[in-house]
Amino acid sequence: MKKRNVLLVVLITVLLVMGTFVFAGGAKEADGVVTVNIALANNPISQALSKLTQTNYKADGVVVNVSVLPENDLRQRLTTEASTGGTTYDIFYIGPYEAQTWARNGWLENLDPYFAALSAEKLAWYDKGDLIKGMADSLALDGAQFGLPFYGESSFIMYNKELFAAKGLTMPQEPTWDEIYELAKKIHDPSKGIVGMTMRGAPGWGMSGAPFVTMVNAFGGRFFDMDWNATVDTPEQREAWQMYKKILREAGQPDILSYTYNECIALMASGKCGIYYDATSIAPPLEADDSAVKGKLGYVMAPHQKLKSNTAWLWNWSMGINPKSSKAKKQAAFDYMLWATSKDYAKMSIELDPSGASTPPAARSSTYELPVYAKAPYAAMTLKTLEGMDFTKPTLEPVPYVGLQYIAIPEFADAGTKMTEYLADYVVDKISLDEAIRRTQEVFDKVAVDGNYRK
Amino acid sequence: MTSGAIHHMGSPMNTRKYDYGFILPAVIFVAIMTQVPFLLTIIYSFLRWNLSRPDIPRTFAGFDNYAYFLKIDTLKHLPEFYSILWQTFFITGTTLILCSVGGFLLAVLLDHDIPGINIARTLMLGPFFVMSTASGVIWKTTIFNTTFGWYGVIMKSLGFTPVDLVSYHPLAVIIVLFTWQWMPFFILVLLAGLQGIPNDLIDSMKIDGVNWFQGIFGIKLPLIMTHMRVAIMLGLVFIIKEFGLILVTTAGGPGTRSYTLPYAVYMQIFSANNVGRAGALATMTVLLTLVLVNLIYRSIVKRNTQYM
Amino acid sequence: MQDNYIQRKKRGMRVRRLVGKLILTLIIYTIALFYFSPILYMFLSGFKTEQQAVMPSFFFKPTLATYKKVLGDPTMYQYLRNSLLQVLVGTGASLLFGVPAAFALVFGKLKKKDSAGKFYLWFITTILLPPVAVLIPLFTLYQKLQLINTPFGVMLAYIGFHIPIVVWMVYSFFSDLPIEIFEAAGLDGCTKVQQMVKIAIPLARTGIISAGLLVAVFIWNEFFLGFNLTGNPTATLPVYMSRFREQQGMFVAQLSASSTIAVLPAIILGWMSQKALVKGLTGGAVKG
C-alpha cells in the first residue's frame, strides 16, 4: 500500500477513536425535556417512591428517571461518581454519612439559595420546620442545608409477642444486651424451626455494621480515642464482638452471613423468629395486612449495656443535588426533591398503601399525626427512639468523631466493611477473636495515619 | 512474502508498498484501549490518591502503595495481601487441575461413536456459554441454599443438617463453580486433540494389543499435550480474571476469605476509593498473570519434548 | 462344527460389544445430563409460578404466567437492547479491525521478516491483560467525559479487548489457505484489498464466522467492564443478573425466567460455533 494511504488509514482510525470519545460524551437531550436521574436503594420505601414517581409526579418538560440498585452497589457507585465529578446522577440518594463529608468537599449543592428563591406560598406549603430536627441537622453543615431527608430511621427491638407468651417470657421496656441474649436463647428452638433472634449478618459497614457498631457503643467501646489512637483492642469492644457472635451462633438464623435485612424481614414476617434488632423503618412492612405477624409484634428500645442511652442508630436516606449537573437539571431536581419530601407525598403514600408500609417515616413530625400512625403499634416507640438520638455523642468516652452506627470519615466505608468482614470470619470460626480484633485494630490504626487524622 | 513484489517492478526499493494499513487500525485501537490505560494504571500506582479525600493532594508516593500490600512487619502476621495471593493461586490452581483431569477423562469418554454423541457433547458444552453472574445466582439460589435449594433439601432428606457452604466453605463453592463453567472448554479443546489422532495409530494400538489404560494415558495423553497446554494457558488467563461469579456468590467473603486479586482491586477502587493502591494491586496482578502463563508455557513444552 | 464355534464366538463378541456400547451410552448420557442439570432446572423453573418455585421440584404444572411478567417488564427489554447493541457493534467492529490485521500478518508485506511474528505475539499478550489493569484510568476518564451514561464508553473497551481474539483465531484460518492462490491473484492484477475481500474472506468464512460468534458470546457474557463502566440506562444483561444477588424475598421463578432469556442466545450461538471454535483456538496455539 502506498505510504500516503497508510497515513490516511491511521489518521482516520485515530480520529474515529477520538471522535467517539468527544462526540459521544453527554447524551443529547430532546429539545425542552430535562431528564433528572436518580438511583434508589432496593428497600420497600424507596420502591414506593419509584412507583409514585412514575404515576404521580408531573412537572412540565421534566422526566424523572428512577433506577434501583442494591444498596452496596448504590453507595459505591455514588461515592465514586461524586468524587470523580461524574454526572450520571443528578440527585444523590445518600445518608448523613456521605452528606457530611460530601458537603465539606463541595460534592453537594448548597440548597439554601434554592429555598431562598421559593415563593412564600411554596415555602409555607413545604413547611421546612416540620422536618425532624435531628434528621435535617445531620444533612446540614455550618448551618447550610445540603440535603433533604426522605425517610429516616433509628433502631429498636421488635419481638414476637406470641412466641414470648408461649414460653412465658416478658420483654423489658429497656433491655440490656445480656437480657436479650438470654431471652433469645430461651425462644430458640431448631426442632420447631424457631429462631431466637435474627440480626443482619451479611458484611458491609451499612449492613451488619449498623447493628454491630451500636452494640460496640452500648458495651462502652469506641474506635478512636481523642488522640486518634485506634481503640479496637479493648475489653469493651471484645465484649461486643463476643455478644454478637454468641447471639447469632446460639440463637440466630441459619446461613448467618447471607442475611441482609431482606432475609431478616422475611424470617421475622414468617412468624418463626422471636426477636429482631433492626431499623425502625422495618416495622411498617411487618405490620402490613399481608404480613403473618401483623399485630403480633411488640417494640422496645434498642438494648443498652454499659452505655445507658443513645444506643440506637440514626440514619436517613436523603436527597442531595449533584453540583456538576446543568442548571436546568439542578432546578428540576430541587423541585422533585421538594415533592418527594413533602407532606403531600406522605398522604399519597398512604393512598398507595393504607397500612403505612410505604410511607416515609421519621422525616417529618407531621407524619406521626396521620391517622394511620396513631393506630400503628410501633409509632410511639419510634418517636421515643428518635427523640433520644444524638449523633454527636455516640459513645461512653469522648471521641473525635460523630455518627452513631458509623464513623463519619470517608475511610470508614472501607475500614468498617473490613471490620464486618473480620467479624463475619470470627462468627463462623474462621479466625479467632484475637486475630479478628488484631486485624481490625490494624486497619483502623492505618486509617488514622493514612488519613492524616493522627498528627 | 513475495506476492507484492510483482506489482512493484520499477519502483526503487519496494518501500512504498507495505501493508501496514491493514494492521495499524487494529493496533492503534487495541493500544489505546488496553496498553495506554495499563500504563496509566502503573503511573497511578506510584501516586498517593484517595478519591474520597480531595483535601489530601495527589503526590508522588514512590513504592508506598506497593509497600502497603507487600511489606512484612513480622513473619507471624503477614499482611492480608498474601492471603489474597494464596487464595488466588489456590482457586486458580485447583480449578485448572480439576479441569485438566476431569476435562481429559470426559473428553476420552466423549470420544466414542455412540448414537447421539453430539447431543451429549452439546449438553456438556452448555455451561461454558452461560454468563457467570447468571450461573452464580442460579447455583446460589436454587442449589446451595440450605432451605430452598437442592443441596439443602437433599441433605435434609438424608438426615443431615446442611451446612451453609457459601458462608463456611466459600473457596470450595467458587472452585466448584469455576470448574463447572470451564471444564466444557477443556473438554472441547482436548476432544479436538483426541479426534485429531490419526486412525491408523488407533488401529495399530488395537493390533499391538495395547490395553485400555495404557492406551489412554500412555499414548493418547502425550499426543495431545499441545492442546492441553492451550487449554491450561487460556484457562489460567480467564480464570484469574473472573470477577462476576465471586461477586454474586460469596462477595469475597466471609471476611476476605474468598477474595481474589481482581476482586481486591475492585474493592480498592469502589469501596476504599484509593486509586493509588488499586493501581499497585492491578499492576501486580498483571505481572503475576504474565509470570504464570510463561511458567506453564515452558513447563509443558519441556514435558512435551520429554515425551518426544 | 468349527464354523459353528467361530460363529458363536463372533456372536458372543458382538453381543458383548453391543452391551458395552449400551452401558457406555448410558454412562455418557447420565453424566452429560447431570452436568447440564442446573441449567435444565433453570429452564424448567421459568415455567413455574413463584409458589411452585419455592421448593425444588421437577414435576409441576407449567404456566406462562412468570414469562408474561418478566417479558412485560420494560427494564428487561432495556438490558436486552443494551446487550444486543454491545454485541452487534462490538463484534462487527472487532471483525472489521481484526480480519484485515490477521490477513496482513499472514499474507501482508511488512518491513521486517519477523514483524508479522512480533505483531502477532503482541496481540496475543494483550489477551492476557486482565480488565482490572485498565479499569481505573478508563473509569476516571469516562466519568470526566460523561461516557458512563452512554453505551460508547464500554463499547470501545469491548472492541479493544476483542480485536486480539479475532486476530488470533482468524490468523490460524488464514494460515491454512494456500498462498499460491494469492500469488496467482496478485499476478492477475488483484490488489491486496481485493485479495482479502474476494479470496481470503470467502475461503475462510467459517473461521471468520466462528471467531465472530465467539466474540459475540464473550461480549454478551462480559461482566467486569460492563458492571463498572455503565450506568443504569446502559447496563447489560450480566449486570442485570447480578442485581438478583440481593433479592427481596425469593423470586426463583422470575429469576429463572430472566436467566433463561439472558442465557439462551449465548448457548445457542456457542453450540453453533463449536467446531470452528476449536479449530481457531487450537490452531492458533498449536502454531504459536
Image (cartoon, rainbow, N blue to C red):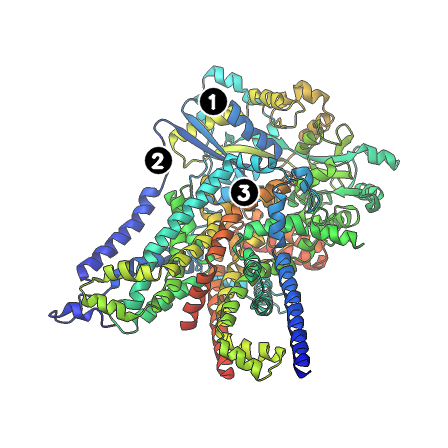
**Chain at numbered mark 2:** A
Question: Of helix, strand and loop, which one carries label 1?
Answer: loop
Q: Which residue is mark 3?
A: A75
Q: Position of residue A85 (x, y in %)?
A: 42, 42
Give the mark, 2 or 1, whose residue is nearer the N terminus: 2
Q: Is residue B110 left or right of residue A294?
A: left
Label 2 and label 3: CA atoms lie apart by 27 Å
Q: Secondary structure at mark 2?
A: loop
Q: Is residue A42 left or right of residue A195?
A: left
Can residue A12 be seen at all in this image of the molecule? yes
- Residues tagged 2 and 3 counted as in contact (Cβ below 8 A): no
Choose between A337 and B138: the one closer to the eye: B138
Pointer 2 with pointer 1, Cβ within 8 A:
no
Q: Can you identify the residue that label 2 sits on?
A: A28
Badge 1: residue crowd in 10 Å (few <14, some 14–19, many ≥20): few
Tag 3, which chain? A
Q: Which residue is mark 1?
A: A58
Between circles 1 and 3, the one closer to the viewer is: 1
* Same chain shared by disc 2 and disc 3: yes
Given the image, what chain letter belongs to the residue carrying mark 1?
A
Q: Which mark is residue C181?
A: none
Viewer-nearest residue: C160 or A444: C160
Left or right, residue B212 beside residue A268: left
Query: Is label 1 in contact with label 3 (beta carbons under 8 Å)?
Result: no
Amino acid beneath label 1: Lys
Q: Nearer the viewer, mark 2 or mark 3?
A: 2
Residue found farthest to the front: C1
Q: Are marks 2 and 1 on the same chain?
A: yes
Q: Is residue A58 above or below residue C247?
A: above
